Amino acid sequence: MTGPRLPLVLLGLGLPAAAGWLLACLLTPLPKGTARLFRWSLGTALGLGMGSLSYMLWRILGGAWTPPYLLGETALFIFVFFVLACILKKSVSAVPVVGEPAKAPGWLTAASLVAAAGAAGIFLARTLVEPHGGWDAWAIWNLKARFFVRGGEAWTRMLSPVLDWAHPDYPLLLPSTIARWWSYAGSESFVWPALAALVSAAAMAGLMWEALRLLRSGTAAAVALLCLAGTYGLAGQAASQYAEAPLALFMAASLACLVLAERTGGRGPLVLAGACAGFAAWTKNEGLLFIPVLAAAWLLAGRRWRTPKLTAVEFAWMVVGALPGLAAVAVLKLSIPGGNDLVTGLGAGALAAKLADPQRYWMILKTFTLESLKLVMPAALLAAWGLSGFRRSSDNQRGALLCLVAAAGMLLGYGLVYLLTPYDLAWHLSTSASRLLMGVWPAALLGMLLIFRFEE
Amino acid sequence: MPPVTFRPGSAAALFLIAGMALVSLFVQSWNFTKITTSRVERAVDPVTAFEARFSPLKMDNPIHGPVGYLGDRKPKDLQSVMAFMLTQYTLAPVVVEQGAAHEFVIGNFFSAPPTSDQLLELKLEMVRDFQNGVVLYRRVP
């Protein structure tokens, strides 16, 4: 990257993140000066989504992709979001969530920071050994980013049925983000896909830390960081530049915002939760599954206290937030000639046979269990909770239920997809189950640590 | 604010989590080092090395539309699939399709390229051999 390009790159990357941060500040009902890490992490997630959408919008409209134009579209997009945020701010009042959160013991905080540094080291080493990422990174995500940058008006060739192995129907948040950054940088350096992965992983860790510190305690925050950093394979998975890292970020961010909404009320967090869910759908097809799962979990968690009218109003605010991401998904899905490889060509007879085959259920259950155990930290956390007497916090029952039901719903959905997969089940499970479970793990961790109680 | 306190069981639980996380990271680092030593010794990762083979073709590239692809390994072989996908990754935004049904066809060979008889059968003529297993063919009318 040449010298004069650096300010442009910083602006290109920073402006959407700054806009996301502003949105997070305006729409989270927390006192000024608090929850900085939460807002920055959430803002980063929103910035990724907003930057991707602005890029896609201009590419669909056939816009020339020159540096001055890049700045112009970014400024315009951010202006629109500022206006929306100002309107929404009128209905949000800043109230403290809890008192000053209890701090973690120094040794625990130190251990969590050491673990985070270790995970960062693994991420860096893996990136240096595989700068183009894992197989799916160069075969799917970075390949599509190259079509965006190199293809000019012919970028739509990436949607060709000839490239069915690159899954033309996959959502484009990650490729468009990488392409956008490459356009700003003026080169196709591996640094930018790696940075997208790093930013996603770091934002997720920051968001989990601060959400749990605010809603539970410093101890829960430190345990979350230990569990994320120590999860076997997670740092390497993030470094592989797959879409699982941003997907996990958006799912965790959406749930954290909903938990915040449950605790504080207000429409702002509902809009943010919807926006993150929409961006999850714009990241991977698994994110599309997250939309109904999130809605069902939210309805279930609040069923005892929420009136039908309140449910409708709150749901509407979530839909408002989700619309940009869902609109992008709709445009993509309507533009491609073929359907998804997992559902095309499935006959009713074949489906019924698969549903009635107990061996398939057993294979899926066994794989999910074994892969969960291989992650190490879910079992370690449950064992530790047992050691501390299975004590529960009374403050976050609804929030914990929401996260755990959402995580369980995602697992059920994945299980159903595996059950009906047209591919060889053993192959399909062996090539994807581990990373899908890693994507759900942060959401489950958030739910577990909202309710697990270790301190007096 | 009073200092946070723990029951003995809870303190042990936190030690367990911290210990397991740090051990897990250590094992990951150890395994990662073992796996990647050979790759590090090669200095260049496989994708970058693959792309370097195609540099002469890309610099002298007359093709813009879709191209065909011929390899010398069994189509279902994992290395063969990887070589084909990497060719697409390297040549994007040109769309690469398996087979010889296009005006231009990319040959990507790790052993011997097709014989002249085989080329005749495929109705292909060589445009340029880049001397590193990468060959550009044109379809004979």
Image (tube, coloured by chain):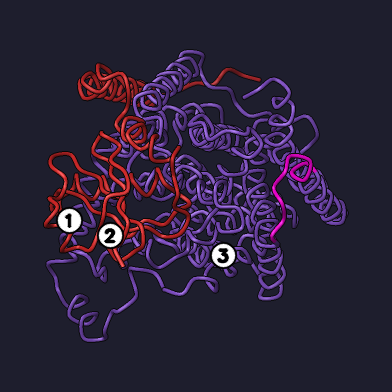
Chain colours: A purple, B red
Compared to A37, does B113 lie above or below? below
Secondary-structure class at tag 3: helix
* Disc 2 crowd, CA 10 A, few/some/many (<14, 14-19, 20+): some
Q: Does residue A156 appear left or right of residue A375 in this picture?
A: right
What residue is drawn where x is 40% and y is 27%?
A127
User: In this orientation, does residue A37 appear?
Assistant: yes
- Separation of residues labelled 3 and 2 (CA atoms): 29 Å
Compared to A416, does A141 lie above or below? above
**Residue interval drawn in magenta:** A62-71
User: Which image quarter: residue A413?
Assistant: bottom left
Secondary-structure class at tag 1: loop
Dot 2: chain letter = B
Q: Quickly name the residue at label 3.
A: A329
The circle drawn on residue B75 is 1
Residue A69 in magenta? yes
Between residues B16 and A32, which one lies in front from this camera angle? A32
Compared to A446, does A129 lie above or below? above
* Disc 3 crowd, CA 10 A, few/some/many (<14, 14-19, 20+): many
Compared to A345, does A437 lie above or below? above
Q: Quickly name the residue at label 2.
A: B98
Q: Does residue A359 appear left or right of residue A81 in this picture?
A: left
Q: Are marks 2 and 1 in contact (CB under 8 Å)?
A: yes
Between residues A451 and A138, which one lies in front from this camera angle? A138
Q: Nearer the viewer, mark 2 or mark 1?
A: 2
Q: Are marks 1 and 3 in contact (CB under 8 Å)?
A: no
User: In this orientation, does residue A96 appear?
Assistant: no
What residue is drawn where x is 46% and y is 36%?
A453
Dot 3: chain letter = A
Dot 1: chain letter = B
Between residues B79 and A122, which one lies in front from this camera angle? B79
